[in-house]
Amino acid sequence: MAMHTKGSIDEAAYRKKDIYSNEEKKIIMDRLDEERRIHQEAIKGLDGRKAVYNENEKEKILKQLNAERLSKQKREEINKIRTSNKELYKFGKKKLYKFLHMEREYYIETSDCDKLSRRPAIITLYYRAFDELKKKDVLMKTELYSDKFFISYDAIRVYFKEYSLEDKRSK
């Protein structure tokens, strides 16, 4: 038999009910809130989060943040180099860049250049055939150290070759 303390009601009785009074709702909500706070504090202790850091820890964190910032900045600069000052072609509503030294004159949409990363992705390239654009899906990726695009014509037998975009012609 459960003992009743002041301000609390038997839990078994709560579980059998469908409708609760305002006092019972408040008791249930207070208990749930207390359990949530205890759980959050336990997780916070397991995460190793601290409110106060010593000088060495602060220095490590700042170095790590600076390294991440520099890495992001370098990625953005290389992405800019890949597509800046390149010849832009328009076919209908599509804005395309042209690759150099490929088996055909392949073009890539300007929006697809922004989607590329180090992880290979299937990208649609376009080529002209009798006044119309045809499509070819290729596997493409970029690398941090290079301003070129790495393209594999076959997604099954992957062999990447590097290609660059056509520079703007002086007029």
Image (spheres, rainbow, N blue to C red):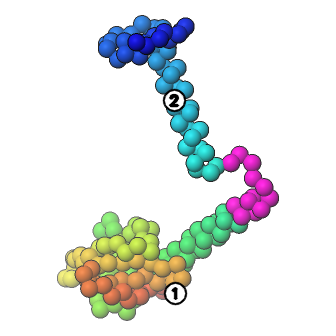
Question: Outermost residue toward the front?
Answer: 1
| Residue 18 lies in quadrant | top left
Figure check: 51 above or below 148: above
Point out which mark residue 35 bears.
2
Q: Label 2's element? A: helix
Q: Is residue 55 left or right of residue 168?
A: right
Comparing 25 with 116, the one in front is 25
Which residue does the image show at 34% across and 72% down from the upper left? 121
Disc 1 versus disc 2: distance between alpha carbons? 70 Å
Query: Amino acid type of disc 2?
Result: Glu
| Amino acid on which disc 1 is placed | Ser
Rate crowding at label 1 as few (under 14), some (14 to 19) or many (20 or more) other CA atoms within 10 Å.
few
Q: Which residues are magenta?
A: 50-62
Residue at numbered disc 1 = 170
Instruction: Kindly tell me whether residue 125 is visible in this rendering.
Output: no
Relative placement, left or right, of 57 versus 16 is: right
Q: Residue at x 48, y 25 (%)?
A: 32
**Could you say where residue 159 lies in the image, as x and y percent from the top left?**
33, 88
Residue 87: % across, % down: 45, 80
